[in-house]
Image (tube, rainbow, N blue to C red):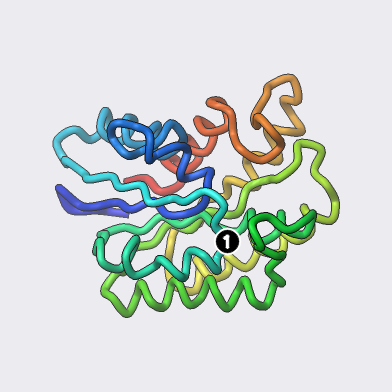
Amino acid sequence: MKLKDKSTILFQGDSITDAGRNVSPDGLGNGYVSILQGLITAKYPERKYKIINRGNGGNRTTELLARWKTDCLDLKPDLLSLKIGVNDVWRLRGEADGQKFIPFEEFTANYRNLIEQAQDSGICKFVLLSPSAIADNQDKELSRHLDERAKFVKKLAEKIKAVYVPIRETQKVALTRYPHVKWTGDGCHPTLAGHALFAQTWLQTVKL
């Protein structure tokens, strides 16, 4: 995926993308977006890419749609990287702040709406990340919902000629193969190692 010098890369999603961006000096947080900013700058210092993080903790596709114009379309990014879907599923285990589980059909409709609005606004380069794991023990019911959504995101990426980043798939392998490593702090939010795994997978797949 070739980008022009000084291109803007926007990262969107929930708390995993957010990673405390509102309390970090550069507004990038302390997660995979910040790690990627460092890696991308070190690898391509001459390109002067602008990295923006607009992840928002607790967001499902529903909340993301509500703020899409201000936090995505109005920013006019050259590349949009989207990671959303964990909270849509996690609410199956109980409501949080009035949020409920988002059924698959509603999730796919919301996701398509996000992409279509972005396309209509002139955004033409997309990186779509699969939703990551929720529980280290790979809760069967939650995993089934997440796997279903990951397959949808992958097919949509193929359809719109976007880059699909298999962070869920990579994370599942890591959780199984290296159980001694603490990849998440609570079964969902990545540790530094978990965020580094996401950043590594992103950069290896996108290949700027």
Marker count (numbered): 1
View extreme (top): residue? 180
Image quadrant holding the N terminus, namely bottom left
Tell me what residue is drawn at x 40 percent, y 31 percent: 35
Residue at x 43%, y 31% (from the top left corner): 30
The residue under the point 69% across, 34% down is: 186
Identify residue for label 1: 60
Judging depth in this view, the residue of 31 and 199 nearest the camera is 31
Q: Position of residue 36 (x, y in %)?
A: 38, 36
Residue 57 image position (x, y, % from top left): 52, 48
Q: In this view, does 197 lie to the left or right of 120?
A: right
Crowding near the residue tagged with mark 1, few <14, some 14–19, many ≥20 C-alpha atoms within 10 Å: many
Q: Name the kind of residue labelled 1 in the image.
A: Arg
User: In this view, which residue lies farthest toward the right?
Assistant: 140
- Residue 167 found in image quarter: top right
Measured as percent of width and height from the top left, residue 124 is found at 31, 69
Q: In this view, does 104 lie to the left or right of 79?
A: right
Q: Answer with the quarter of the image where residue 177 lies.
A: top right
Q: Relative to residue 113, is residue 58 depicted above or below?
A: above
Q: Is residue 143 left or right of residue 4?
A: right
Vertical position of residue 107 compared to residue 17: above or below: below
Q: Where is residue 189 in the image (x, y as percent from the top left)?
A: 61, 38
x 65%, y 32%: residue:
184
Say what secondary structure mark 1 lies in. loop
